[in-house]
Amino acid sequence: MTDLTSILPTLVEQTGIMLGIVALSLAFGGIGGLVIGTGLYVTRQGGILQQGAVWWVLNVLVNTVRPIPFIILLAAVQPLGRIVVGTGIGTEYAIFAISLAATFGIARIVEQNLVSIPTGVIEAARATGASPWRIIRTVILPEALGPLVLGFTFAVIAIVDMSAVAGLVGGEGLGNWAVTYGYRQFDEVVTWSALIVVVIVVQLIQALGNWLARRIMRR
Amino acid sequence: MADHIVIDRVSKRFPPAKRGGAEIVAVDDVSLRIERGEVFGIIGYSGAGKSTLVRLINQLEPVSAGRITVDDVPISELRGKRLREQQTGIGMIFQRFNLLTSRTVAGNVAYPLEVVGVPRAERRRRVEELLEFVGLGGRADAYPEQLSGGQQQRVGIARALAANPQVLLADEATSALDPETTAEVLDLLGRINRELGVTIVVITHEMEVITRIADRVAVMDAGRVVESGTTYDVFTAPQTDTARRFVQTVVRALPEGDELAQLRAQHEGRFFTISFTDAGASEARVFGALARAGVDFHLVHGGVDDIQGRVYGLLTIAVRGDDDAIERALSKIGPGVTVEEQR
């Protein structure tokens, strides 16, 4: 049995790497998802920038990428990674692949939350002569902010899940560590300490998300 | 008075709901002229096209045919930035208030000011002034859900007035409010019309709203304007069935059919219906003439209504007594009153 104190420095280091992967993937995927999700919402039938062709392309793109199991996507987009981040392996490439998957997952979450905004509020803003871009910034996104925060919280946890597979392409992080040193070396202390840390991290993220959303929605 | 809003042979068609279905004609060849400074009412059942029509005035929806000018500007032909500039001059209030839940009362009222680019300090001053005007001074930092329906509509009104519009469109603005709050909001709209000179277009299915504030009214049915005129004329002498049915919900109608039979069972004597407008007549003259002739009578149906501050009476009375005495009494009532026997 491994002594817990001897693995503690590695555990902390790998947790840090995982959090780094999650934070960067959330940033890139969050921005990408917000743009595509909002794009889907405003270009759909009856949207403030109704554009059938744009909506169709975005919709097909999201529907194509989203169902691909992440482990397959991770392997498949290596050529694209080499173009965008200059490499098809390692932590950096893993962040690229996770951001890509997160973009399309978050896009749907964003779209679903925006659809629930009462159309009357947007109509009232249009009646004041506000431009579509202003309405997106000052009405659509602020009005949906509470549910969006909850949706993003849901996405972060999915990203934590995806980050565990980074080891497949030579990326580091808690998941890789648990597989390499825990699973493959039959070291249950490593596996279980990684698991417990992940559970704690997820709990904290969820609590933070809930707290933030409640504050925004004032209830 | 000059025309403020001219709606000229305007139609609005929507694509069919189902593939291969029929096109929906929401507004069908409507022409109306709305004068500067008046309160113009549009009534009709739900689905009559009135809400669509009002959305054509500020171009929330483009017209399918025809032309709309506001202040001689052909708003129905504008697009993009030029259209948005014109829209800032037309305020709108809604049945469900449509306030931004992410903003405070002050933030909601400031919204149109941000759109037109009023600087922050000036914005704050104007918001304060507007909230004072609608009677919500001190509630600037509240959020919409902390306010009652009537208060929320006041915020909606303050927001609609923020950019100093010359036109205010009210789309069923009191339909979600109780009668007392409705009266308060209507008083406020009246003040806006009188004190600020704003032309108001009121869409409603509540006839009390029309009789209270509208100078003129148009009746819509199946996308068309079937009747229009001064509120008093339309309500005291409706020309179409649609208008008559509406009017009967507020102006007391003549008893008919079962109702009349029931009244006859309850009351003896001959039934007369007396109608009078505000041209100097009143029910007192009728009752006085009958009393002096010594005939026994009592009121069985109807009443006296107030339409835009003018009187309109429609009473049915049961009269018992000698036929000659009745005829003599009725002949002495004089002009301004119409008496008709119900047989």
Image: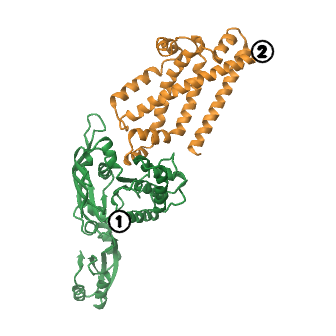
The answer to whether residue B20 is left or right of residue B187 is left
The residue identified by callout 2 is: A6
The answer to whether residue A4 is left or right of residue B38 is right
Position of residue B277 measured from the top left corner of the image (x, y, whole percent): 27, 76
Indicate the quadrant where residue B172 lies.
bottom left
* Observer able to see residue B52: yes
Q: Secondary structure at mark 2?
A: helix
Question: Between residues A13 and A151, which one lies in front from this camera angle?
Answer: A13
Position of residue B178 measured from the top left corner of the image (x, y, whole percent): 46, 61
Position of residue A121 measured from the top left corner of the image (x, y, whole percent): 43, 46
Q: Chain B is which colour?
A: green
Amino acid tagged 2:
Ser
Q: Residue at x 25, y 39 (%)?
A: B22
**Residue, far top:** A185
User: Which is more foreground, mark 1 or mark 2?
Assistant: 2
Q: Residue at x 38, y 53 (%)?
A: B92
**CA neighbours of label 1 inside 10 A, class few (<14), some (14 to 19), many (20+):** many
Question: Between residues A107 and B276, which one lies in front from this camera angle?
Answer: A107
Amino acid tagged 1:
Ile
The residue identified by callout 1 is: B213
Is residue B293 positioned above or below A148 on the image?
below
Q: How many marks?
A: 2
The tag on residue A36 is none
Chain in orange, by letter, is: A
* Mark 1 to mark 2 CA distance (whole Å): 83 Å
